[in-house]
Amino acid sequence: MTGAGIARDLSLRGLSVLLLEKGDWGAGTSGSSTWMIHGGPRYLEFDWDTTRRSSEDAGFIVTIARHMVYRVAFLLPILPHDRNNIERMETAMEVYDRFQPLKKSNPHVRLTADEARQAEPGLTSDLVGAVTLEEWGVDPHRLVFANVQDAMANGARAMNHTRVIELLRDGANVIGVRYRAADGSLSEARAKVVVNAAGPWVPEVSRMAGANVQLRPAKGIHIVYPHRISNFGLSAETVDGRDVLMVSHGGFTLLGTTDDDFYGDLDSVDVHGDEVDYLLQAFERIFPAIRNYRPVRTTTGVRPTLFKWRRYEDELSRRYQVIDHSADGAEGFITIAGGKLSMYRLMAEETSDAVCRKLGHQAPCTTAVRPLPGSESELEPAAELGQRFGIPALAAIKLQSRHGSRAGDVLDKSDAGRIVCRCEPLTESELAYAARHEQVRTLADAFRRVGIAAGPCAGAACVMRSAEIIGRQLGWSASQRFDAVREFVQGSWLGRAPVLGHSGWAQEELAQGALRGLH
Amino acid sequence: MGRADSLAKLAWAYGLHLTRRRLTRPKSQLPALIEMYKPNGIRPLTPTERELHPRLIGCINCGLCALAAGRLGKTRLPDLASSYMRLYARLADASSDLEGGDEADLEAASAACPVGLPLADVAAVVRRLAAG
């Protein structure tokens, strides 16, 4: 996320920019977040400044990305033996209300136990009361790509599935990178400044310059349900006293997250059954029916938290640091480490300021006020858009949540309004557009960009057809399409296996039948 | 220093909060909450809908109900269960999809469903939420 934000910021300041992403846009930490732009009420216990800065930047983000953000109203239920009683919890929300206007959010309300159960009848009867909290939801994959898209519109080059394998040196100066592109070809690019915005991979890239940046990576998992379980977000206390969230986004629900020190391979992070049980145990206390719902998969990622000794993971600051490596003998090399999604724009601004200082380039940052692509103008009513292109209003709503005021352009460029993924719902023309214009190179990229296979059937009904549509745009042969589907099915199984059980097996049987021969 | 300062400010706010609670008579804030989020489609399910909900969203998108009973309004029955029921916060903006067209035989559709989805209940909830 931060790399995309920096590329956008610097290209808007008139600099020549090359952005390289080793995986796909938003496939790392950003994509496996809780999908929230928030101020961070829990930081009030540690550091009000982080809450203020985060709220302020969230306010900018929800303005420049207005077509892709939506309000998330949380109920914070209080049970008799919770760590915080209702008075302490309401005090925290009263304090947080001072920051809410910065991000254009509403203040809290307090509910009795009966009122809370009217708002969400699924809450346990063993309830003292509840307070509410408002944050913003966003699809981080689209947020990342909107930044990439705007950077490219302003002259940047941006390549996904392209891995930096070496930094080029001229004595003490870092003068560029050597990289391997998606097709396997090796290339070099020269630059006056190289920025390392690799998230949890920051130490690995820093080592290429002989610099040492120490992080304390923390693993987090989410359980994904393919439906809105509740219109309200919910919080619950875990067995070890942490707060975890259940948040509905569009048509699915995220339940998480864990927060554990991680020492393994960043490119292969597994989800374990006990992590799933830990989250379910917490939510079962406040929402007893949670085990009646069928999860469809899990997500996992690693937070690039700044290093600190003698702190529990949950207490680690979400602050960030812009590091100029001149003192490490790597002139022209800058690292941005730490931080969080909600502050990506600010992190990008401060990193871009550091780059401009190095270059002696004087141009102000405009990313706080300039709308991202699709947020430039008001949205057409979804029913009218749908009628104009012969698609259901619900499909038009989903299209607008990704493309905003540019939704009509996506459909204009194709004559097909047919639905390819009925769960989402997603049109064939949008998928073809994503392959042509949005750097979709695999089915997993399409999942991130337009949400194929994100619904209850986990792709059983749409991945074969999707491979045909993408393949037609990218010139895939029949065997390449087959391989693309197999790779996707095998990859998504890894996230699905930890939560399969009960009714999930009926779905799995159907998927296996539909995709027979791929395994 | 940052943490001590934060905790001191929270302690002060806590004192103020307790004093305010003693001096004011609380009144129900639920109507304000419902009104606040109505434009965003954030509305409670009824207790009956909540109880049924895990079954209402059990669709595995096999398509057998479409063979049995076709459409509700302009909407195919599998879509009703797999996408409209999923996106229920946005149904008010998509109510036109459910108007006109056919009146499906929902009992026949439910009978054909391999996971026993109560499609008549699904249709009732979707219509209630789409009505705004």
Image (cartoon, rainbow, N blue to C red):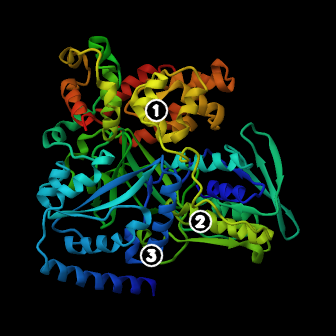
Q: In this view, does B3 lie above or below A342?
A: below
Mark 3–mark 2 distance (CA, rounded to whole Å): 24 Å
**In the image, which disc is placed on residue A222?**
none
Amino acid type at image mark 2: Met
> What residue is disc 2 on?
A347
Please tell me which of labels 1 and 3 falls first in the chain: 3
Q: In this view, does A76 lie above or below A44?
A: above
Name the image quarter holding the N terminus of chain A: bottom right
Assign a secondary structure to mark 1.
Answer: loop
Residues tagged by mark 1 and mark 3 found on one chain of the structure = yes
Q: How crowded is mark 2: few (under 14 residues within 10 Å), some or many (20 or more)?
A: many
Which circle, 2 or 1, is nearer the viewer? 2
Label 2 chain ID? A
**In the image, which disc is placed on residue A453?**
1
Q: Give the x, y percent position of residue A216.
A: 54, 68
Residue A518 can be seen, yes or no: no
Assign a secondary structure to mark 2.
Answer: helix
Which circle, 1 or 3, is nearer the viewer? 1
**In the image, which disc is placed on residue A311?**
3
Mark 1–mark 3 distance (CA, rounded to whole Å): 39 Å
Amino acid type at image mark 1: Ala
Q: How crowded is mark 3: few (under 14 residues within 10 Å), some or many (20 or more)?
A: few
Q: Residue at x 56, y 48 (%)?
A: A26
Q: Which of B127 and A112 is in front in this view?
A: B127
Mark 2–mark 1 distance (CA, rounded to whole Å): 32 Å
Amino acid type at image mark 3: Arg
